[in-house]
Image (spheres, rainbow, N blue to C red):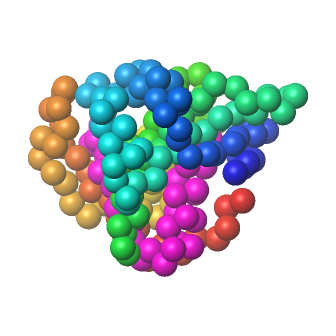
Amino acid sequence: MDVEPSSNLCLSINPVESSHLDQILDIEQEAFSAPWTRVMFEAELVGNPFSRLYVATPIDDQGQPEDIAGYLCYWIVFEELRILNLAVCQPWRRQGIARRFVQFALYDAQTQGVERALLEVRASNTAAQSLYDGFGFREYGSRAAYYTDPAEDAILMRLEPIEFDDPF
C-alpha cells in the first residue's frame, strides 16, 4: 500500500517477507539497547496468528523502492490492538514514517472492529510518548524496571475507543 506522508516522502508499506529480516535486524540494533533477535522476528512472521509485521520503503523520484526505512510489529487480538515494536532507521527519522505506521495500524484495527489500542514505551522515550499522545493515547499506568540495558520503567498507554478517519 502506498501512502503519502505530510512531507513529500512517498512510502510503500507492505507485509514483511523473510528476505527483509537482515535489514530489519540492522534497524533494530541501531534503535534499541535491548534489541529483538532474529528468532523473535521469525516467530512473529510465521508462528503467531495475531501478529502483523510491516516494513516501510521510501519510493524515489523515479518510482523505485529504496532500502527499508523502518518496520512495525503489532498484534490484533480480538478487540485489542497491541503495538509491540516500531523503529525507523536514523536517516529516515523525523520524516513522518513512525506517524504513518501508527495511522496504518489504527486504521487496520478499526476496520476489524477493534475497540482499544495498548502499548508500552520507555519512560525516557518522550518522542515516542509525544507521537502516541498525538493520536489520543493516554498513560494509564507503569511497569517498574520493565526494560533492561538500562533498567527503566515502562509507561503503559491506551487509546479507547479507536475512532480514526481513513488516513490514506
Foreground: 45 or 147?
45
Q: In the rendered image, is residue 31 in sight?
A: no
| Magenta stretch contains residue 118 | yes
Percent of width and height locating residue 97: 60, 41
Which of the 4 image quadrants contains residue 29? top left
Figure check: 146 above or below 94:
below
77 left or right of 89 in image: left
**Is any part of residue 80 visible from this angle?**
yes
In the rendered structure, the answer to whether residue 93 lies left or right of residue 150 reads right
* Residue 98, magenta (yes or no): yes
The residue positioned 40% from the left and 64% from the top of the image is 76
Q: Is residue 102 above or below residue 26?
A: below
- Quick one: which residue is furthest to the right in this view? 62
* Quarter of image, res 118: bottom left
Q: Nearest the camera: 145 or 43?
A: 43
Q: Which residues are magenta?
A: 96-124
For the point 53% across and 41% down, which residue is it? 16
- Estimate the x, y position of residue 44 in percent, counting from the top left: 36, 46
Relative to the observer, which residue lies in front, 164 or 36?
A: 36
x 56%, y 73%: residue: 111
Residue under the point 33% across and 49% down: 47
Number of labelled discs? 0
Q: Position of residue 56 (x, y in %)?
A: 61, 39
**Above or below, comparing residue 13 to residue 134 in the picture:** above
- Image: 158 above or below 19: below
- Quadrant housing the C terminus: bottom right
The x, y position of residue 65, in whole percent, is 73, 30
